Image: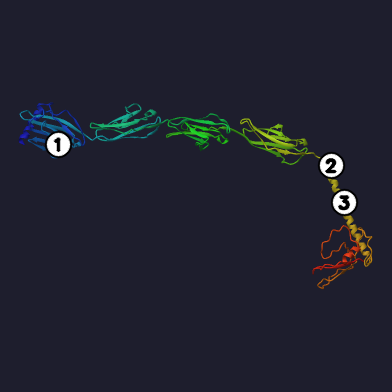
Amino acid sequence: MDILALLWIISLVSIGLTEGAGVLPDGPLNAAVGGKVMFTTTLTPGTTFQIVNWKFGGIRDIFTFNVKNFPAPGYEGKITFFMSTGSLELRNLVQTDSGEYIVSIFPAGEPSKTGNTRLDVYAPVSKVTVTSSSTELVEFSSVSLSCSSSGSSLSFLWLNSSSEVTGSDRVQITDGGSTLTITNVTRYDQGPFRCRVSNPVSEGTSAPVTLSIYSPVSKVTVTSSSTELVEFNSSVSLSCSSSGSSLSVLWLNSSSEVTGSDRVQITDGGSTLTITNVTRYDQGPFSCRVSNPVSNGTSKAVTLIIYYGPENVNLKISPPHKPYLEGSNISLSCSAVSNPSAHYTWFLNGGLLSKGSQFNLTNSQENQSGSYSCQAFNDKTLRYETSHPASISVLVQSGCSAGCIAGIVIGVLVVLCVVAAIVWYCFHDKKKKKKKRSAGNTNTRTGVEGQDNGAYTRSQELHYADVRFTKKNNGETVQMGDQNKPSDYAEVRVNNNPRAAVSSLPTYDAHIQRNKRPAPQPEITEIYAQVRKN
């Protein structure tokens, strides 16, 4: 080893004497962690060496050749020495292998040769990623893009599509190139943006990031192909327009969403609403709501005018239907469901009478009786409809005036009162006379048994003074009233049988004959009486 030390001293002197003439290439040499590097000398292959020595950092031996190979501790398995040129290969690199390497070579019979170079070991680039502060932006707002990556000694390059992004008044690249900031973004700043990261031994590029840059929604307007339509006959198209980008359109009828149907079509990306065979319920108001992810707006409402009718024509008479006397005032009115309001025409028995929704019969006459009807007409839909006919009868009054009628009524009442008084007087006078006659004939026979009563007339009265009573079939005696009191008998019924209608009073002989007939067996509660005329 003393010889080796001596040779090393001699080599250092030689380096100083031969500055700039090295046997290693100019550095630095770049290598990746986990990789390998070849320190190749400039010597001609086949040179015979007595001693070769490699140092790291100028002071640490890593390998020595002196007849045999002597790798330094920690380098076993990492070094390969090439005898033909004195070159050295270093494997399984780590970042701490970065530094200066020196070689000293002692050829046989020649001056010593030396050389030095630098090795830089880098961690490779990996996991390159771009993140954005926002991907949905309103035009003229700002955004920041950040690039991150693993590796060492990294360099950053920003790309918009395939073009390099450089700084400007709106674009700033900061944080060692890892941050890209764009102010007042426009629709042309949407990208896609990528970040390319590199070092001397590797590089990597991120996935693209595309910004969604929206113009805000504004100036939302609805226009209509027509605003005056006829029910069932017309169709209409409503168009929605708006400034902005990436727009979505929603149609509203009042506050309810309009959806497609057999009569409703929504086309042109939602911006056109078409309604066929419109009805009165399609009048709206219609509005369109436009939105994008960053803003929205709603148009002013549009109301359609839809003409319909007439229908449900109704004729009313006041006072209600009844026979009317001549001179009565009668009012007729006509109405219909119609837009605009209908025009009305009146007819009597099919003949044109008048126009207007009201028709009045003032001081009506008999010749105004007949069948009345009204016809409604809509001058927009050009449709007619006629009411059901209504009959009016006007009766002729008598010739007597109202005063005359009142006098007649009063006279009739007076006559009725007089007649009633006469009847009452006659009735009481007759009753008094009967009482007097009855009193004068007490206990006096007005005839004998078997007397001929052929001369009896309807105007004569029959007086029965003696009434004999028989016993009931159970032997009891029927109690008799006071016989001294006069009694008037107009007829006698036996056995409670209903009597036949009598057209005149019976004669005494007929009465006797009727009493001679066998009497029917009475019930226990019946009373039998035999009447003899005095």
**Dividing the picture into quarters, in which one does residue 340 lie?**
top right
Number of other residues with Cα within 10 Å of mark 3, as a class: few under 14, some 14 to 19, many 20 or more: few
Quarter of the image for the N terminus: give it. top left
Name the residue beneath numbered marker 3: 419
User: Mark 2 to mark 1: distance in Å?
Assistant: 155 Å
Number of other residues with Cα within 10 Å of mark 2, as a class: few under 14, some 14 to 19, many 20 or more: few
Q: Does 459 sit above or below residue 349?
A: below
Instruction: Measuring from the top left, give residue 291's x and y in whole percent.
Output: 45, 34
Q: Does 481 sit above or below residue 409?
A: below
Give the secondary structure at mark 3. helix
Q: Is residue 102 visible?
A: yes
Q: In the image, what residue type sits under mark 3?
A: Val
Q: Are marks 2 and 3 in contact (CB under 8 Å)?
A: no
**Dividing the picture into quarters, in which one does residue 216 lie?**
top left
Number of other residues with Cα within 10 Å of mark 1, as a class: few under 14, some 14 to 19, many 20 or more: some
Give the secondary structure at mark 1. strand
Instruction: Measuring from the top left, give residue 114's x and y in whole percent.
Output: 11, 29
Of 468 and 67, which appears nearest the observer? 468
Q: In the image, what residue type sits under mark 2?
A: Cys
Q: Are marks 2 and 1 in contact (CB under 8 Å)?
A: no
Instruction: Measuring from the top left, give residue 175's x and y in whole percent.
Output: 30, 32
Name the residue beneath numbered marker 2: 404
User: Mark 3 to mark 1: distance in Å?
Assistant: 165 Å
Of 47 and 211, which appears nearest the observer? 47
**Dividing the picture into quarters, in which one does residue 375 lie?**
top right
Name the residue beneath numbered marker 1: 79
Q: Residue at x 52, y 31 (%)?
A: 237
Q: Upstream in the sequence, badge 2 or badge 3? A: 2
Q: Residue furthest front?
A: 518
Give the secondary structure at mark 2. helix
